[in-house]
Every structure is written in structure tokens, then in C-alpha cells.
Image (cartoon, rainbow, N blue to C red):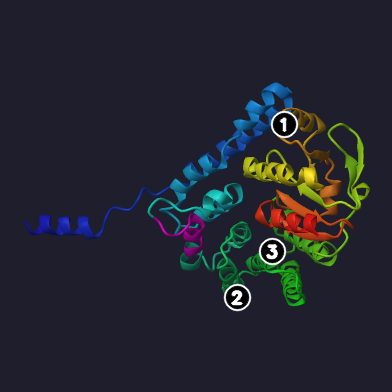
Amino acid sequence: MRSLTLFLLLAVFCPVAGRAGTPEAAAQIRNEYEAAVRIWAQKLAVADSQAQRNVWKNRPGSSDYGARMWMELKDSLRTDWTIEYCVWLLERAPVFAAETDSGESRSRAQFIIQSLQRFHLKSPKIGMLCLALTSQPDRSILKVIETVEQENPHEEVQGQASLAIAMLLKGLGDDAIILERRIRNLRRAIIKAHEVKVGDTTVSKLAMDEIFVIQNLVKGRTAPDAIGRDSAGEPFKLSILKGKVTVLAFWHTSMRDAERGLGLLRKLHEQHGKRGMNLIGVTSDSREVLRSLRANGTIPWRNLSDVDGRIHSQYRVRDLPLVYVLDAQRKIRYIGGPGSFVDLTVEGMLAE
């Protein structure tokens, strides 16, 4: 009888934990998503304009795969195998990561941050997690990553944290003090983690690109004269739009949350295109894909096919989508993602 009572007490006060995930299952989800996106991109490239709209609507949903990944991760965050897949979740499904589960007050990203602080602060694996967290709008992340830089014993992680800090500081403005803090962190990143790979590039290359941006592509500077050919093969120079408000938008059909990003650009074009604003897209998609998307109304604005990446390199583009708002003299007035800040900047400039 005593044993039964003890069992019932344990059942009440120590509920069974959720099912622990496994690295094998997480790897399977990641691989399925990457394969699905590749197949989708191939179908999009060969579909005619009539079929392409249906293909576009059936793009693999990053949030769907993100939800499956979160089921594997959420009850195992104290284990270090989850770090790699938390990075994947934050990079591939940042909007999903920023949302909360039913009945929770904290976002999924905040649970990941808490696990970093409690269990992984001194792990040699968290450098990429620091960089992935820069996709989140949570202001508390800066302080967390500063703690990683100060307390993690691994020099390469310290360097990756320094790069992440510089990225996060970008959102705090362009005054001289913040720019100097960014440059200091970027220099530390180069010194401590210069050869560390980040996707198909390195910490050193990313840091050097950010220094170039600070020196040449901040608000008030003249934007480079992007030169290319549009989806019809016609030559284009950004300088021909002198005297007009211009939004230069970098995007790609396979970018994360593509439907949402292009939806925001479409709304911007509809609201301000007839009032004198020029929206110019830049993408590494082929002209064939662009012509089809233009024909079916998915992208009604003019787009440049930058297959060789020359314009992307000029503007040091890393994350997509990325928007530059330029005034009538081609001076930069805004840099960031599409959304309300772009709308407000354009609205103010058109009213001047």
C-alpha cells in the first residue's frame, strides 16, 4: 500500500517528460527538407508560366519542417547534439522559431537561448548558434552573446560571438559610437576565428565584408551603380533612375520564407509604384525563371538576373531578402528587410 501511495505521489508531482528526440531523426528531417527544396527548385526552373504559379504555391514549407524538427529538439535541449539542429531551425525557419507553442509564454528561440545559458555556455560547438541567433528580433540576445564571448574558453567561439555581436549592433543605428563598437568586434572576429567556415564562406570574409559595409554602404553614402540585364535581356544601370526614389531588393526563389518576403515586396510595389517609386529586384535566379514569374504576375516589378553574383558582391549581400532604399541622388536612406520600416521610409521620401 505504501508503495502504491508513493507511486501516485510521483505521478502527480513528477509528470513524465516528453519524448526525447534523437540526432538520427533530426538529421532525417533536415535531409528531407533540403531534398524537397532542391526538387521544388528544379520543377520551378522547367515549368511554363501557366504551371509555374502552382509550383510556386507548393514550395516546401519551412515552418512545417521546423515544427517536426522542434518536436525532436524541445525535450532534449540540454544535450549537445541539439546545437547543430537548433542552428538549422533558426536559419531555415526563423519566423517559426520566433513564435510560441500553445500555452507557452516564451518563444521557441527563447527556449534555445535558455538552454545555451544553462547547459552549453562553454561548449566548443556554440559559435554557429551565436550567429544563427542574429536572425531573431529578441533584444536580449545581444547580452547573451556578449556573455559567450567573455566566458567561453574557446578562441574560435569567441571570434564567432564577436561577429554575431557586430551583426546585432547593426540594428541599433549608425552613430559613431555604435560603428566603432562594430568595427572592434569585427576585428576581434578576424583575429580569433578567421578560418572558421560559415556556410560557403569564412568568418574572416564575413567580417571584412561588414567592415566594407560600414565604410561604404551606410546611410548617407552613395549606392554603387548596379549594372546588369533584366528578365527580358535589356541592359540596365541604376544611375538611369537618378531623380527618383528607388528600392533595390535582393531576393531569390529559394530564400527562407520566400512567399512572405515577396508578398511584402508585392505590397510595396502596389502601394507606391504608381506614386513614383521604382522597385528593382536583384536575384541569382535565371532569366527564364524571372520571365515566367513576371508573366504569371508573381513579381510584377522589374528584376535583374545576377547569376554571376556581381551585384550581390558589390552590395555585400549575405542574408535574403535585403532591401536598400535610395533617394533621388542615389543616397542610401534605409538598409534591412522588407516590411513596415521600408514602407515608412518610402512614404516619407515621396512626401518630401
Residue ID at (67%, 22%): 51
Distance Cα–Cα, label 3 vs label 1: 35 Å
Q: Residue furthest bottom?
A: 177
Q: What residue would you read off at disc 1?
A: 297
Distance Cα–Cα, label 3 vs label 2: 17 Å
Q: What residue would you read off at disc 2?
A: 150
In the structure shown, which secondary structural element does the residue marked by tag 3 occupy?
helix
* Label whose residue precedes the other's in the sequence (2 or 1): 2
Estimate how packed mark 3 is, as few (under 14), some (14 to 19) or many (20 or more) residues with alpha carbons within 10 Å. Answer: many
In the structure shown, which secondary structural element does the residue marked by tag 2 occupy?
helix
Q: Residue furthest left?
A: 1
Which-is-in-front pick, marks 2 and 1?
A: 1
Q: Magenta part of the protein: which range?
A: 104-114
Indicate whether 43 appears above or below 337: above
Q: What residue would you read off at disc 3?
A: 167
Amino acid marked by disc 1: Gly
Q: Is residue 316 visible?
A: no
Estimate how packed mark 1 is, as few (under 14), some (14 to 19) or many (20 or more) residues with alpha carbons within 10 Å. Answer: few
Q: Horizontal and vertical percent for residue 351?
A: 78, 57
Which-is-in-front pick, marks 3 and 2?
A: 3
